[in-house]
Amino acid sequence: MNEVCSHIDNLVVSTNIMCFLRKARGVAAALARRCLSVEARKSNFGYEVVTETEKTNKVYGVFQNVAKNYDTMNDAMSLGIHRWWKDSFMRLMNATPGIRLLDVAGGTGDIAFRFLDYISSKPHRAFQKEEQDLSWEEISQMYEQREGEQSIDKGSMVVVCDINKEMLHIGQARARERTNTNGLSWILGNAEELPVADNKFDIYSIAFGIRNVTDIPRALDEAYRVLRPGGRFMCLEFSHVTNPVVERLYDIYSFQIIPVLGEVIAEDWKSYQYLVESIRLFPDQVQPSRKKRWIET
C-alpha cells in the first residue's frame, strides 16, 4: 500500500512539474517575443508575411487609398448588408443617455453617427426620474415644451479614434453636414496605444477594424484599460461563412469580383485584395488560432 501511495505521490509531483514547465515555456516565449524589436516581429498583411512595422504602414496605405470610397468598399465587401449589421450592432449596444462611447477605427463616423441618433431618440434619464411622480397631462406638456430643443445636454459622449488621417477627414466632413453632433469629438490615435485616460468610457466599440490591427492582444489590453468597471467591449467584424454552398459562392465573389470592383471603383486592386485576404485569415467562430498557425507555416 505504501508503495502504491509513493508511486501516486511521484506521479502527482511529475504532473505538477510538467505543468510548471509548460507554463514556464509559455512565459519564456512571451518574454522572447517582447524582447524582439518591432522590426523583427512578424505579422500577416493578407497572405503576405511581413514585419509588424511593415504591416502597420501597409494597412495605413490601404485605408488612405480607400477612404473616399469607404462606404462603397463596404457595400462591395458585404453586398450592402453592412448597413443592416451596423444598425443591429447599435440595437445590441442599446446605449442610454449619459453613456460615454469610444469608437476605435471609426474614422468615417458610421458608428458614431448611429450612436448619436440612437441616443437622441431616447428620453434623458433625469427627465425620466423627475417625471415619475407627474400626471400624464404634466408629462405630455413637458415633452411638448422640449420637442425640437437641440440644446438639451443629455450627457452622452462619443469619441472617434482612428490611426488614419484621411479616414478622420472623411468623417469630419460628413459631420459638418449633420445637425446632431453634440458630444462628438475626434482624435488621431493607434488602437495599440490609445491617447486617452484609464477608466474613462462605458463602451468601447470597433467595427470592421480589429482584423487590421497589428498587435490585437495589445489593442485588447488597451480596450480594458480605458473601460470603466463594468464597461462593455463590442466588436463587429467579418467572419467565415458556415454554409458550404454559400461559402463557395462567396469565395468566388470575394477573390474574383471584389478586387475587380476595387480597380473599377477606386483604381486600386491591391487594397481590395488585401481586405478580402484579411477576412480569410481572421479567426473564425470556431478556430481562434487560425491566424497564428498561418504565420508559423
Image (tube, rainbow, N blue to C red):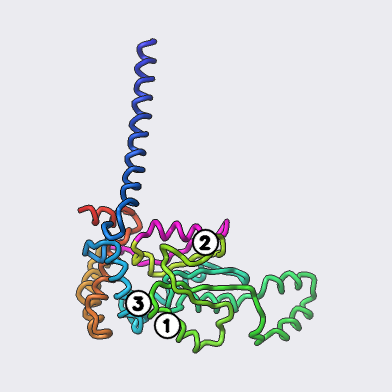
Is-magenta flag for residue 233? yes
Q: Rounded to the nearest whole Å, what is the CA distance between mark 3 and mark 2? A: 28 Å
The segment highlighted magenta reads 215-243
Which of the two residues, 134 or 290, is positioned nearer the viewer here? 290
Label 3 is placed on what type of residue? Asn
Residue 209: x %, y % from top left: 38, 68
Nearer to us in this view, 151 or 190: 190
Q: Which mark sits nearer the N-terminus, 3 or 2?
A: 3
Q: Earlier in the sequence, mark 1 or mark 3?
A: 3
Question: Can residue 164 be seen from the camera position used here?
Answer: yes
Report the side of 236 relative to 252 (left or right): right
Is disc 1 placed on a helix, strand or loop?
Answer: helix
Instruction: Please tell me how crowded label 1 is: few (under 14), some (14-19), or many (20+) other residues with Cα within 10 Å.
Output: some
Residue depicted at x 50% and y 88%: 176
Image depth: mark 1 or mark 3 in front = 1
**Label total for image:** 3
**What kind of residue is marked 1?**
His
The residue at which mark 1 appears reads as 169
Identify residue for label 3.
Answer: 74
Label drawn at residue 226? 2
Amino acid tagged 2: Val
Any magenta on residue 33? no
Q: Secondary structure at mark 2?
A: helix
For marks 1 and 2, the one nearer the N-term is 1
Q: Give 222 or 76, whichever is nearer the viewer.
A: 222
